[in-house]
Amino acid sequence: MIQLHYYPSTAAMIPHILLEELGVPYERVLVDRAVDAHKAPAYLKLNPNGLLPVLTDGDLVLYETAAIVLHLCDTHPQAALAPAVGTAQRAHFYKWLMWLTNTLQSALIIYFYGERWMDEGNAAGAAELKANARKKVGAMLDQLDAHLGSHGGPWFMGADYIALDAYVFTLCRWTRNFSAAPARERPHLGPYLQRVLARAAVQRVIANEKLSPPFV
C-alpha cells in the first residue's frame, strides 16, 4: 500500500493530485506541522530534512517531490503522466520538472520563509529578501504564462494532461494571496489554472485536504 505523508497545501499536494489521477489505492498520513510533527523523531527517520512530502511504497521510502513525481510516473506508465522515455518531449518534461522544483519552488520558499536565511532579529534583511524573491517569482510566473501562450494547448505541454500540470497548479496556488499579480491574473495562466482546478482529481484533493477558497 502506498502511503503519502502530507500536510494540507504544501508540496505534498502535487503527489496527492497524481495519486487521485491514477486512481490507485493509497493512504494519506497527516503530518501535523501545527504541532511540529515534521520535526518529531519518527518522521525524521523517514525524511531527515523534516520536510514534506514523504511517500512510502512497500519498503521504499522516498522524499523530494520531484523524485516522488517521477516514481509515480515510472511505476504507472499506463497513465501517461509523462511523455515517452527517449523523446524530445520527455527531455522537456525533465527540464520543466527540474525548473519547477529548483527554481520557482525555491524562490517561493525564500519569499515565504526569508527569515531562515537571516540572522535572528534581522527583520530589515528578511523584508528585503522577501521583496526581491517576490520580484523573481513574478518574472517566473511571466515565463510560465509565455510558455502556455506559445503553444495554445489546454495543458502545460500542449494537448495532454501530465504530471507537470499538478506541479504548476500547486506552485501557482501558493501565489493566490499575493497583493499584486498572483498567477491567476495572467492571461494564459488564469484560464489554465481554472482548467486544472476543474479536474475531478483536483476537486477530490481540495476536499481531502479541507482547503478553503480562494483555491488558486
Image (spheres, helix red, strand yellow):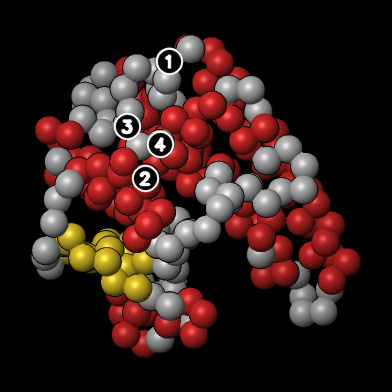
Question: Which of the two labelled residues, at mark 1 and mark 2, occupies the earlier sequence position?
Answer: 1
Could you tell me how far apart the alpha carbons at marks 1 and 3 are, in whole angstroms?
13 Å
Q: Residues within 10 Å of mark 1 (few under 14, many from 20)?
A: few
Residue type of the residue flagged with mark 3:
Ile
Do the numbered discs 2 and 4 sit on residues whose CB atoms are within 8 Å? yes
- Could you say where residue 63 lies in the image, as x and y percent from the top left? 33, 61
Residue type of the residue flagged with mark 2:
Val
Asked whether residue 90 appears in the rendered view, the answer is: no
Q: Residues within 10 Å of mark 2 (few under 14, many from 20)?
A: many
Could you tell me how far apart the alpha carbons at marks 3 and 2 are, in whole angstroms?
13 Å
Could you tell me how far apart the alpha carbons at marks 4 and 3 are, in whole angstroms?
15 Å
The residue that disc 3 covers is 162
Q: Which mark is residue 153?
A: 1
Could you tell me how far apart the alpha carbons at marks 2 and 4 are, in whole angstroms?
7 Å
The residue that disc 2 covers is 202
Do the numbered discs 1 and 2 sit on residues whose CB atoms are within 8 Å? no
The residue that disc 4 covers is 198
Label 1 element class = loop
Residue type of the residue flagged with mark 1:
Gly
